[in-house]
Image (cartoon, helix red, strand yellow):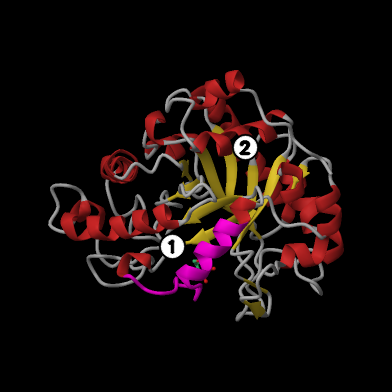
Amino acid sequence: MKKIAAITAAALCTIACCKGTQEPQNTTIAKLQAATEAGKYMYAHQDDLCYGHAWKYEEGRSDVKDVCGDYPAIVGFDLGGIEKCDSANLDGVGFDYMRKAAESFAAQGGIVTFSWHLRNISTGGDAWDTSKYGVVGEILPEGPLHEEFMVWLSRVADFLESVKGPDGQPIPAIFRPWHENVANFFWWCNAHCPDDQFKALWAMTYEYMVTERGLTNLVWAYSPNYGITEEEYMSTYPGDEYVDILGLDAYHFGPAEGFIAKLDQHLTYLERLAQEHGKLAALTETGMEGIKEPAWWTEILDKAIGSHKICYALTWRNAWDRPDHFYGPWVGAECEEDFRAFHDLDNTLFLKDIQ
Ligand code: BMA
């Protein structure tokens, strides 16, 4: 085990003082900060507790645990569908199952994170429906769909409020809305709305959740996609008062050397920006679909992260119903052995290391 010690309140202040050091979110920020200070990063996996490669809904099961004997330190869930009161999210994970999985994981000392692939309220399409320019403007306070959208947002708040710890309070969670926005594939991307409208959307989301609904348990992650310059990264930055984590979503396509070099370039500015703004930095999504490199974990991902100070790296989901759509390890995968070596590295943290 490679335990990290919880960081002192004084050190935490440099990260969290903008929000006041007493808020419940700070227990999570403290763990993430402690990892950063120790030069280590947490391993995170999307949907890890709900399903895996060729299985679904087996309580306590996790592809990661099957392979290395420990759970990830962080697990991700997606709220897409909650806005319309669906009983399951866009990938078929029931919200009741999700709530129980998140509560049980947090009770064991793990950290949870939520993203939101929500539908397009203006067209009725999905998150990827970019057929109409300016939908963000339509849901801002002056827009025609504002009231309708606030009902959608209230359903997210209701869910996050309902995920509780043993003390009856909502558990701390990393909330990562409006992700991969410096691109063109989601309706909220900068190709489909002016930058100031994106910033207003973020501020509106934050004000509603935190000020109006009192959800002070949330740790806010801003996470543009990669393939962008520092200037582009900051062009839609909502502002220090609304963000705790400077994230980056970066997938591996093409030759390994290219990915390693490109990630190094992005993490260099991300790490510096995080220091300058008093924030944490994280690789909020990464992975290689179908992990075609047997030593991807130790020779590519860990090499690409190098000595950059990030607090976690999250690989995307292992779909139970699409055999080639996986980004994490599973028993029988070619990268299985290498994942165990990745788990054993000094600088990677799993659940047992942060409990
Ligand atoms: C994408 C894919 C989709 C999925 C979406 C939301 O990257 O994994 O199959 O629906 O994420 O989880």
Query: Magenta residues, as a range?
Result: 85-104
First in sequence, mark 1 or 2: give its number.
2
Label 1 element class: loop
At label 2, the amino acid type is Leu
| Quadrant where the N terminus is found in the figure | top right
Q: Going by the image, does 73 lie left or right of 83?
A: right
Q: Amino acid at mark 1?
A: Leu
Looking at this view, is 37 or 257 the one in front?
Answer: 37
Mark 1 sits on what residue? 79
Circle 1/circle 2 CB separation < 8 Å: no
Q: Is mark 1 within 8 Å of ligand 1?
A: no
Q: Is residue 168 visible?
A: yes
- Locate residue 127 relative to residue 11 in the image: left or right: left
Q: Is residue 309 above or below residue 333?
A: above
- Residue that badge 2 annotates: 32
Residue 92 in magenta? yes
Q: Which quadrant of the view contains residue 88?
A: bottom left
The quarter of the displayed image where residue 354 is located: top right
